[in-house]
Amino acid sequence: KSYLFVVFKERKIHLRIFELICGLVKKFFNKLIYFGFLMPKALVKRVVSKILRVLGLHGIVKKILIQLKLLRKG
């Protein structure tokens, strides 16, 4: 194999890896923008509630919010 063929093949591999990384970064930021700014408030509350339940903090946070009168009982 010639030197140019090897260089071309390496450059092609590096270009493909770069394209994959750029695609992943773009998808990540699109999701971040969607979940951070465009997601409806009800969905945000549901996601936060599920995360707190998994961490075992749901009851504690709920009591604090009721005491601060930010959340109604029921």
Image: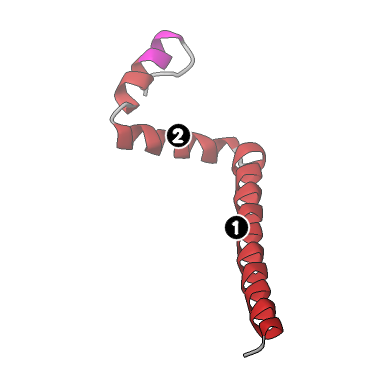
Could you say which is closer to the camera, residue 37 or residue 16? 16
Whether residue 25 is situated above or below residue 58 in the rendered picture:
below
Q: Secondary structure at mark 2?
A: helix
Whether residue 13 is situated above or below residue 56 in the rendered picture:
below
Determine the main secondary structure of the stretch shown in magenta.
helix
Q: Which residue is mark 2?
A: 48
Which of the 4 image quadrants contains residue 36? top right
> Percent from the top left, x then y, of residue 71?
45, 19
Mark 2, other Cα within 10 Å: few <14 / some 14–19 / many ≥20: few
Residue for point 37% across, 20% down: 61
Q: Secondary structure at mark 1?
A: helix
Could you say which is closer to the camera, residue 27 or residue 9? 9
| Mark 1 vs 2, N-terminal side | 1
Whether residue 66 appears in magenta in the rendering, the answer is yes
> Percent from the top left, x then y, of residue 56?
28, 30
Residue for point 37% across, 32% down: 52
Kindly identify which numbered label has been placed on residue 13.
none
Tell me how far mark 1 sits from mark 2, CA to CA: 25 Å
Q: What's drawn in magenta, residue-wise?
A: 64-68
Q: Which residue is mark 1?
A: 24
